[in-house]
Amino acid sequence: MSALSALFARELKLAVRIGGGALMAVVFFLIVVTLMPFAVGPDLNLLARVGPAILWVGALLANLLALDRLFQADQEDGSLDLMVMAPVPLELIVTVKALAYWVTTGLPLAIAAPLFGMMLNMPSEALGAVCLTLAAGTPGLTFIGIIGAALTVALRRGGLLLAILVIPLMVPVLIFGILATSAAVVVTSPFIQPFLILVALSLGAMVLGPIAAAAALRFGLE
């Protein structure tokens, strides 16, 4: 546990020092939310209706920003080989790295989402649900993304390939995240069903993602 705690602290420090960490993701999220009204027009009612989709697409893209470097930096300095040979199971190491990435990327997006929802004219009573759905769904995006990061670890410019690999897998999370957030905007729609499915998808990704990513890392380093 001490080794995993040290790894978690290391990942947090690296995320802050390299690439801006949470700030870069939140700024990118803000850019997406700011540009969308220019595309759909100044109709406030329309913005409120498409606001959940805009927030979720922005969160998905922001989550992919630094994902390709999650294992590549360790592979370049040789620490990935040490992680593979460590007595700690590689699946746990991958889980810790993914959690640190989510804390520095996904969690700030969920916290900032209500403010950006106000920019899209979303009703104030739905802003809490926006934060809740993103907090429940972004772990699923991260743990799906680590599979692509592990598969492209040996490629110097694997960011585009990573996006091609993982975005189709993220579509179910995106769909039910938008449904749950839209249900909070349109009160007549059920909220709990899509939200529970969203939570189930995230939990499934948190279980299967590290296993698949660890297998891909072992295969890639052979």
Image (cartoon, grey):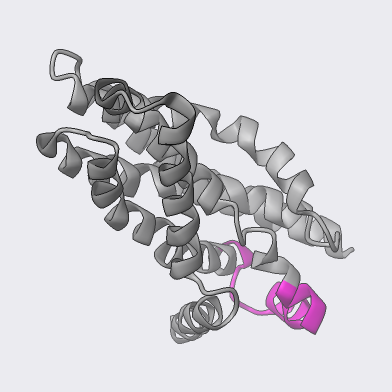
Image location of residue 119, percent across then percent down: 27, 43
Q: Residue at x 34, y 44 (%)?
A: 134
Q: Quadrant of residue 153?
A: bottom right
Image location of residue 118, percent across then percent down: 22, 43
Using residue 29 as the reference point, say whether residue 194 is left or right of it. Answer: left
The residue most toward the right is 222
Image location of residue 31, percent across then percent down: 47, 51
The residue most toward the left is 125
Q: Quadrant of the C terminus?
A: bottom right
Image location of residue 89, percent across then percent down: 60, 68
Q: Residue at x 85, y 63 (%)?
A: 156
Can residue 146 be seen in this snapshot? yes
Q: Residue at x 66, y 53 (%)?
A: 213
Q: Residue at x 60, y 49 (%)?
A: 145
Q: Quadrant of residue 34?
A: top left
Q: Nearer the viewer, residue 172 or 51?
A: 51
Q: Main secondary structure of the magenta part?
A: helix
Using residue 60 as the reference point, say whether residue 124 is left or right of it. Answer: left
Using residue 15 as the reference point, say whether residue 175 is left or right of it. Answer: left
Q: Is residue 11 above or below residue 189?
A: below
Whether residue 187 appears in magenta in the rendering, the answer is: no
Can residue 205 be seen in this snapshot? no
Whether residue 86 appears in magenta in the rendering, the answer is: yes
Q: Nearer the viewer, residue 3 or 12?
A: 12
Q: Is residue 78 above or below residue 118?
A: below
Q: Nearer the viewer, residue 217 or 148?
A: 148
Q: Quadrant of the N terminus?
A: bottom left
Total number of numbered labels?
0
Q: Is residue 108 above or below residue 75?
A: above
Q: Is residue 168 above or below residue 127?
A: above
The magenta stretch spans which residues? 73-91
